[in-house]
């Protein structure tokens, strides 16, 4: 069991989502990806977001991260309504407050691990040094490697370093282990868990893999664009203890 005291999760809502709907219209066809969804996320918690393919997980994460806008409803970040933000305010929100980690690492192949992270630290307000971010994810020995010289798991850890180097308040991970084998996937989950525990970054991890839910403070399941389950784990398992 993880020794993280449950008290590290505060009762302060970082994110408040009210009656959020997202409808995609493609010609005659309308897809209701999210249906009047309301939920809150609290400071410091690690949430695993489960749900079948097409249940709306990525749509929700993209709206939370300011990459997409809802059709209806409101999103508040620390009391500020993001859904009412101007384009420059939204850019500032994405840049300052959100770290994204995707299934495919999206590293720039002509830049070293260090330079990939520096791309972000150079435009952030109060970043951690890029080499410190890479040390946090266990890659201090790979600073000058190019993506092609790194394994998939190492590339994903560079992507995590890049996401956390700007000290975001929210770390959003969309299938971060989707392209990785079992052991490598666990290593990446350990890094995400460490970031959450050591930096206190509120973290949401999307996965298809229900076994990963054991590492969360809280497990939220979506089904057809609605929250079908929202529960707290009594204790977190460390990623090393997860079996699937
Ligand atoms: N840009 C888009 N245009 C039209 N429909 C979309 C778009 N993005 C998502 N959808 C539809 O919205 C629904 C929810 O998609 P979403 O990607 O959020 O699901 P998901 O739970 O993340 O699925 P997966 O686990 O397969 O990634 C799906 O029916 C999908 O086809």
Image: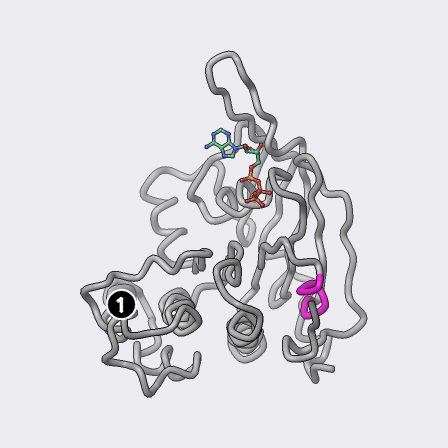
**In this rendering, does residue 98 appear at all?**
no
Write down which quadrant ligand 1 falls in: top right
Q: Position of residue 91 (x, y in %)?
A: 34, 47
Residue 157 percent coordinates (x, y): 42, 72
- Position of 198 relative to 120 (above/below): below
Closest to the observer, 68 or 187: 187
Q: Is residue 87 visible?
A: yes
Q: Is residue 151 above or below residue 207?
A: below
* Camera-side residue of 216 and 181: 181
Where's the C terminus, which quadrant?
Answer: bottom right
- Give the colouring mode of the picture: one colour
Q: Is mark 1 within 8 Å of ligand 1?
A: no
Residue at (70% x, 81% y) in the render? 2
Residue that lies at the very extreme toward the right in this rendered image: 234
Instruction: Residue at 56%, 30% (x, y): give it.
Output: 22
Q: Main secondary structure of the magenta part?
A: helix
Query: How many labels were placed on the picture?
Result: 1
Q: What is the quadrant of the N terminus in the image?
A: bottom right
In the image, residue 131 above or below residue 122: below
Please identify the residue farthest to the bottom as the structure is shown: 141
Point out residue 145 in the picture as x, y percentages from the top left corner: 25, 77
Q: Who's the residue at 57% across and 64% down the image?
A: 202
Element under label 1? helix
Is 165 on the left or on the right of 188, as rendered?
left
- Residue at the spot of label 1: 116
Q: Residue furthest front?
A: 181
Tell me where the magenta segment starts and ends, as one range: 211-216
Give me the residue at 63% from left, 75% from top: 239
**Residue 213 magenta-highlighted:** yes
Residue 204 lies, with reference to residue 142, above or below; the image says above
User: Is residue 165 found left or right of 53 in the rendered image?
Assistant: left
Return the x and y of residue 94 as percentages of the image width and height: 39, 52
């Amino acid at each position: 069991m993880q020794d993280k005291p449950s008290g590290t999760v505060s009762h302060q809502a970082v994110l408040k989502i009210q009656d959020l709907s997202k409808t995609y219209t493609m010609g005659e066809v309308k897809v209701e990806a999210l249906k009047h969804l309301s939920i809150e996320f609290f400071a410091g918690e690690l949430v695993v977001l489960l749900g079948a393919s097409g249940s709306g997980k990525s749509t929700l994460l993209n709206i939370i991260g300011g990459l997409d806008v809802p059709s209806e409803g409101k999103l508040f970040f620390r009391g500020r309504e993001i859904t009412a933000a101007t384009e420059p305010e939204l850019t500032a929100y994405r840049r300052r407050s959100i770290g994204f980690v995707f299934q495919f690492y999206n590293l720039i192949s002509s830049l070293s691990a260090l330079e990939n992270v520096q791309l972000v630290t150079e435009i952030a307000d109060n970043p951690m040094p890029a080499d410190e971010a890479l040390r946090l994810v266990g890659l201090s020995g790979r600073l000058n490697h190019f993506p092609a010289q790194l394994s998939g798991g190492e590339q994903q850890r560079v992507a995590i370093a890049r996401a956390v180097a700007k000290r975001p308040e929210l770390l959003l991970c969309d299938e971060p282990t989707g392209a990785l084998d079992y052991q490598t996937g666990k290593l990446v989950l350990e890094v995400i868990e460490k970031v959450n525990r050591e930096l206190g970054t509120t973290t949401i991890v999307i996965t298809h893999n229900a076994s990963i839910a054991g590492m969360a403070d809280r497990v939220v399941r979506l089904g057809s664009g609605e929250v079908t389950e929202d529960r707290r784990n009594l204790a977190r398992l460390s990623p090393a203890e997860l079996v699937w």
